Amino acid sequence: MPPRYAYWTIIAGGLPTAFRTADRDELLPTFRRIKEKHADAELKYFARGKLWSSPEEARRAAEARRTTSSHRHPSTGESARGRNWRPGGEHRDPRQKFKDAKKARNLAHRRRRFDRRQDDAKGFHSAGRDKPREDGDRPSENSTRPADSSRRRPGPRGGHRRR
């Protein structure tokens, strides 16, 4: 039995018969016998849901359909659907505004980090001083920490750790 999508078949009285084959020559003896009783019998090629007089005709129609696809503009050959085309009513991505906001946030964060790194490389204090730091201007280790040692960072369970 040939594949269902492309085969030769006999049409008798305007209706298809059960005789089908992939090779036309195999069907010719049966076709001649049916032609004796049904003068209007025809031998047709079935492909892509249509009856054709030959496989070449089916191929030509498929090639013509591919070249003038419904997605291409017939005169220019360009795609009728733009880059941002989406199926549905509005033809746009409903999440695009969130994607754009996230990109803007990330860009701003990266700029801040870059500026901070550049300022540190030049020797500017990150607190906003206008002139570069000198060795004597550096704060001591103890001046940035509170003198009170009772303030400790909470542990993994939220409580204070004891040492």
Image: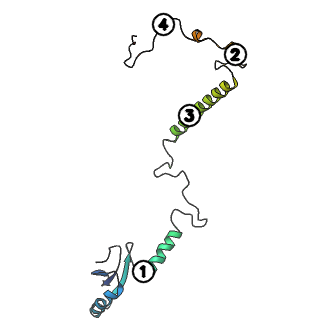
Instruction: Identify the residue at image location x=51%, y=66%.
Output: 69
The mark closer to the camera, 4 or 3, is 4
Label ID, residue 135 = 2
2 vs 4, front mark: 2
Q: For the C terminus, which image quadrant?
A: top left
Which corner quadrant holds the N terminus? bottom left
Is residue 84 rendered to the left or right of residue 19? right
Element type where label 4 sits in the image? loop
The span from disc 4 to disc 3 (Cα, nearest Å) is 37 Å
Q: In this view, does 114 lie above or below 143?
A: below
Cα separation between marks 1 and 4:
91 Å
Question: Residue at the spot x=38%, y=16% of the render?
Answer: 158
Q: Residue 55 carries which label?
A: 1
Please name the amino acid that badge 2 sits on: Asp
Q: Position of residue 25 (x, y in %)?
A: 34, 88
Query: 102 above or below 38?
Result: above
Ranked by sequence position, the earlier of labels 4 and 3 is 3
The amino acid sitting under disc 4 is Ser
Which of marks 4 and 2 precedes in the sequence? 2
Residue pointed to by mark 3: 106
Disc marking residue 149? 4
Q: Seen from this angle, which residue lies furthest bottom?
A: 36
Name, please, the residue furthest toward the right.
131
